Amino acid sequence: MSSIFLDALILQSGYNAALVALGAALLGIAAGSGGTFLFLRKRALVSDAAAHATLPGVGLAFMIMVAFGGDGRNLIGLLLGSAATAGLGLLAVEWITQRTRLAEDAAIGAVLSVFFGVGIVLLTIIQSMSSGNQAGLEGFLLGSTAGMLFRDAVVIAVGGAVAVALIVLLRRPMTLVAFDTEFAATAGINVRRMDLAMMGLVMAVTVIGLKLVGLILIVAMLIIPPVTARFWTERTDRVIWIGGAVGGVSGYVGAAISASAPNLPTGPIIVLVSFGLFVLSLLFAPRRGMLAALFRRRRFQLRVHRRQGLLALAHGEPIFDQLTLSVLRREGLIRQDQVPTEKGRAKAAKALRDEKRWAVARQLYADEAVAARYDGLTPIETVLTRDEIAEIDRVIGPPTAVMG
Amino acid sequence: MGAEFVQLSLTPLLIGILAAIACALPGNFLILRRQALIGDAISHVVLPGIVVAFLITGVVSTWPMLLGAAGAAIVAVIIIEAIKRIGKIEPGAAMGVTFTSLFAGGVLLLEQSDTSAVHLDVEHALYGNLESLIWLSAEGWSSLTDATALADLPPELFRMAAAAGLIALLTLIFWRPLKLSTFDEGFASAVGIPTAAVSLGLVVVAAVAAVAAFDAVGSIIVIAMFICPPAAARLMTNRLEAQIGWSVAFAALSAVLGYVLAGYGPLWLGADNAVSAAGMIATVSGIILALACLFAPHRARIGAPRGA
């Protein structure tokens, strides 16, 4: 299986599979970066409403195409139909949110469930129709690469490329709007038009992704990559690119895995790959990740114990805390029998002096930000200038030595 | 409206009404707390729970599946909380990450395991099988007093009735803490109401409603009934008591009208086949909500200009 997977990964398992992998990568990039704008506007779940609202469009387009004597399964026709109802759904969400007192989450939920219900009604009507070759229409629920024609793969690849190009073109105004709506408005950007462009982009990504991952899971491709990217950076523009990269890798690797064995549906595999990347980020991202937080906590704990230990040495008090003892011992500040070493005495004297200086400083600068910087750990040299410290030292007198 | 109605339509209709009410009751509080999409999330994660339960037990039977679904719902709530806390991610996005991933896992498990022989597939999970919950041995209204015929009622009816009854009872018992903590969490905790426990309890009750209804009628009704009737009711009144009343009425109306339209509507229009009852019930609830958005007395946001 691994060699088949490698073949798929380097695009050697057939022209169709290669096109699907490339299309999935492009779609992933578009979804990941496009979803970032929604995520930054705190409207991530709007995509859920858009995705579910595509179903009645698929059904209607099928029925219309059959009524005109065509093949009901023409992908472009189905996608146009789904775009129409997805757009209608997005407008409905906006209308309900702005014109009634219902909150946005209620509007999203109402639109997604009602449109989906209508879609299911239409599907059951289609199932009872005798013409039009309706088999495989349910594939839009969960996506289906198995029944994908070469034509369909081209539509996905081209659509993904166009969406990526749109994002590259519109990234600056859309970033501004997503990040700071009011600033964007003062900077002369038409916020409403950008919002619509954002929605249009999400709608396009959703519609293109229908055939590949299905309408329920396309939501995942719009939400998971931006959230994953958020762990790695604090800068908006980078979230967009990292989100795009996460989406692209998920799409590409997911499509390759799914091509390497039977019974591995493309949509769920792509989503699970991106969820895997999300979990890795949650655990290991620098600064915002879980491990980083644990390390930070541990370091803080050790600093507190070192400081308290040094102050205890300075006051000649016995130390009972095991962690404090081991910290001091490991750093060569005390000997095995708890007697302070030369270095330990020096550091203890310094800690004591730092505490005294802080006590004075907090009185002198009680009203200023300086006093708030005191946490019992920060050396005063990092907060005050040398002259200010000299001033304080005049008050407390010369340093005292710590006895061994 | 004779024997055929009792045999084919009475039980699905009753189950539909009970499911709608069971979901609408907790939905009222979820809407007011801006947690309306919890229902959406729960109904997606129910799928992996049911699949796992099937893989462990190897049979399609009700209790393991209910337990699996409830377990998955609880796991999902825990994951959402963890992502929110550890990653400092906003609730909507955390929810989106969780339910889509769990759903994808459920679909993958379903494809990997050989469940095609049994009645377990994604379409069934979405649409439910309301139409098939018929009362075979009924021969007319008189069967309602016939013990042997009553014993043959679909078990979903009793489960749904029990769930709806339990939820109504819980709403009644915890009325005061629920109401207080929904409208003023600070005040509620100040007078000694454990608001965190009330929140968790509400989510658990929502999960129970979702799982019970899911079994009988599919997830699409669950999501629609959690949101549409309470949202429409919210536009009708400013009093919580009245809102609950309206929401129950709207839920029941959606169920009845939706079922009738699905079963008989196509016949009236000259078509031969009935359409999905679950989808139609969701559609009707949406129409009710749309009418409420356009005409209900309290539809505008307070302070919004008239006619805006």
Image (cartoon, coloured by chain):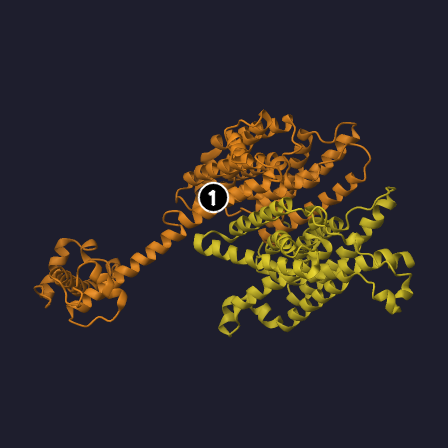
Chain colours: A orange, B yellow
Image coords of residue A26 (percent x, y): 52, 32
Image coords of residue B5 (percent x, y): 88, 57
Residue annotated with mark 1? A277
Question: At x 49% / y 68%, what residue is drawn?
Answer: B186
Question: At x 40% / y 44%, what residue is drawn?
Answer: A232
Above or below for B37 versus A307 = above
A55 relative to B2 in the view: left or right: left
Q: Residues within 10 Å of mark 1 (few under 14, many from 20)?
A: many
* Chain holding disc 1: A
Residue A91 in view, yes or no: no
Considering depth in this image, is B49 or B282 the residue closer to the camera? B49
Instruction: Give the SS element for disc 1.
Output: helix
A132 relative to A335 in the view: left or right: right
- Which residue is most to the bottom? B191
Above or below for B282 versus A215 = below
Considering depth in this image, is B255 or B242 the residue closer to the camera? B255
Which quadrant of the rendered structure holds the C terminus of chain A?
A: bottom left
Considering depth in this image, is B251 or B83 the residue closer to the camera? B83
Image coords of residue B290 (percent x, y): 70, 50
In the picture, residue B271 is in which quadrant? top right
B16 relative to A310 in the view: left or right: right
- Which residue is most to the left? A398
Residue A161 in view, yes or no: yes
Total numbered labels:
1
Considering depth in this image, is A337 or B257 the residue closer to the camera? A337
Which quadrant of the rendered structure holds the N terminus of chain A?
A: top right
Image coords of residue A306 (percent x, y): 23, 62
In the picture, residue A198 is in which quadrant? top right
B238 relative to A351 in the view: left or right: right
Question: At x 47% / y 48%, what residue is drawn?
Answer: A279
In the picture, residue B30 is in which quadrant? bottom right
Give, as a three-letter code, the residue at label 1: Leu
